[in-house]
Amino acid sequence: MMDRLPPFDLIDLRLLLAMSEHRHFARAAAACGLSQPALSARIRRLEAALATPLIFRGKRFEGFTPEGERILVWARRILSDCGGLVQDVAVSGSPSGVLRLGVVPSAAPYGGRLCGRLARIHPRITFRVLSLSSSAIEAGLADFSLDSGLTYLAEGTPADCKAFPIYEETYCLVAAKNVDLKANNATEMTWSRAADLPLCLLTPDMQNRRIIETAFARAGKTPETLFESNSFNAILALVRDGGFATILPRLQVDAGLSEGLQVLDLVAPDARAKLGILVPQREPALPVTSALVAAIPEIS
């Protein structure tokens, strides 16, 4: 005898995820092509089917109940598995579907190259690439809102993920031409000397910043950070205005982001960090993530 099917469908779960994304009834309804009353009615029907409230309601959306948060995790997993089923059945020599990839900001140039390579090999794959912290990437993989992540591997691999190391990150001191680095045409600078410069760095929640702080600590220095941002673009805009310096991964420098600026390799101590691709441990694997992993050697 077949188990009784739940009294709701995949559309109800998609609507719940839309509420999680937009945090607003009218915006979620518009994104789903429904009226607000229709969306509210579907969610109330889901709550009735599960015999538990999922959303805190006042005059507006006030968040999810604890039960609602647990249902969201299941909804993401169910819909991810359904997407994988469709991808698997649709494969006819080339995978298709959406690849949701989280990328730490320092690895953005490599992420772009990797997705470009994959798009040329498999033109039926589309991409949703998000710039996220390493912790946000791990959370996205855990709750199935991401299919894979390009991130730091130094802190160990989550138990439910596979790691594919790609490259080691090294670091450069970058400053405008009018900043006196006292380098005398040298190509290198010590971390100790860099600590005395007026620095703009990523925010402390970013793994790149924590790696930089560790390098300064190994050099016995604590720099004064005058500007913080979670965006390299914002940092570079200030550096180009003059008077400030920053620390960039060598990958960013090689991608041309430091054009027109002074660049010196940072040494003493030798600071490095491993980056790679994380994908969830799931069988069968999503065809799009298998294609992503296969494309890594092509550009490494």
Image: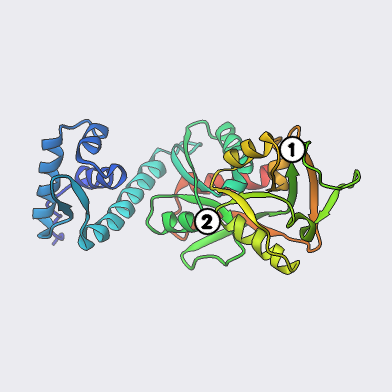
Q: Position of residue 201 (x, y in %)?
A: 62, 50
Q: Nearer the viewer, residue 172 or 246?
A: 246
The spot of residue 174 in percent (x, y) is: 74, 44
- The residue under the point 54% across, 65% down is 157
Horizontal side of residue 67 vs 299, given as left or right: left
**Residue indicated by mark 1:** 176
Residue at left offset 55%, top offset 43%: 231
**Residue nearer the viewer, 89 or 67:** 67
The dot on residue 199 is: none
Tell me where residue 14 sits by quadrant: top left
Q: Quadrant of the N terminus?
A: bottom left
Residue 11: % across, % down:
21, 42
Tell me which label, 1 or 2, sits earlier in the chain.
2
Q: State the colouring used for the structure image.
A: rainbow
* Residue, disc 2: 134
Mark 1 residue type: Ala
Q: Amino acid at mark 2?
A: Ser
Q: Position of residue 63 (x, y in %)?
A: 23, 53
Q: Quadrant of residue 180?
A: top right
User: What's the distance in space between the residues labelled 1 and 2, CA to CA?
Assistant: 29 Å
Asked whether residue 120 is in view, the answer is yes
What element does badge 2 sit on?
Answer: helix
Q: Secondary structure at mark 1?
A: loop
Image side of residue 227 versus residue 181, left or right? left
* Residue under the image location 72 percent in, 65 percent down: 221
